[in-house]
Amino acid sequence: MSDANTSREAYGFFCEIQSRWMDNDIYGHVNNVTYYSYFDTVANNYLIEHGGLDIQNAEVVGFVVSSRCEYLAPIAHPCTINAGFRVNKLGTKSVEYGIAIFDGDAQQAAAWGTFTHVFVERASGKSTAIPEPIRTALQNALFEQA
């Protein structure tokens, strides 16, 4: 049985990301902090493509309040990264994403983690309910373990 956090089949949406020369560190692999930029990219791409998020003009936006990452295998530039995305938990004002980073078409993740957004009114910074189009998109990505 494959691990629900590290198996490609546990993620329903993928974003292809091309590594950059600057992603590598002095040890010759992608630096640990860079994985968080990959997490941010796949989560926001999903919200834009499936939830209609207008990052420039939306009155409600998501603020990152929590994140974590576990590193399982190194990846290095040049490579094509496939970032897997799903929703682990969906509340009324917040969502926890599950994200995994795959080296190309690998079936097992090189890293996986979580990323939590709290939705806030852009003008006031106060938490608010997740807008309905985004909530619907997030419900469609909700991960259900067997």
Image: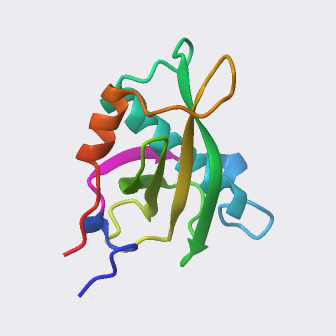
Q: Position of residue 108 (x, y in %)?
A: 37, 74
Magenta residues span 11-19
Q: Position of residue 114 (x, y in %)?
A: 52, 61
- Quadrant of the rendered structure where residue 120 is? top right
Main SS, magenta region, reads strand
Q: How is the image coloured?
A: rainbow
Which residue shows up at 44% across the image and 62% down it?
100
- Quadrant of the rendered structure where residue 10 is? bottom left
| Residue 114 seen by the camera | yes
| Residue 19 seen by the camera | no
Which residue shows up at 49% across the image and 41% down it?
93
Q: Position of residue 23 (x, y in %)?
A: 68, 52
Which residue shows up at 54% across the image and 78% down it?
72
Answer above or below: position of 58 versus 93.
above
Classify the position of the N terminus by image quarter. Answer: bottom left
- Quadrant of the rendered structure where residue 109 is? bottom left
Q: Position of residue 135 (x, y in %)?
A: 34, 36
Q: Pick whichever, 126 or 97, lies toward us.
A: 126
Residue 108 falls left or right of residue 71 = left
Q: Does residue 12 belong to the magenta stretch?
A: yes
Q: Pick whichever, 125 or 18, lies toward us.
A: 125
Classify the position of the C terminus by image quarter. Answer: bottom left
Residue at the extreme right of the image, as rendered: 26
Which residue shows up at 50% across the image and 55% down it?
79
Residue 25 falls left or right of residue 69 = right
Q: Does residue 62 belong to the magenta stretch?
A: no
Residue 77 falls left or right of residue 124 = left
Residue at the extreme bottom of the image, as rendered: 1
Figure label count: 0
Residue 105 falls left or right of residue 33 = left
Answer above or below: position of 40 versus 3.
above
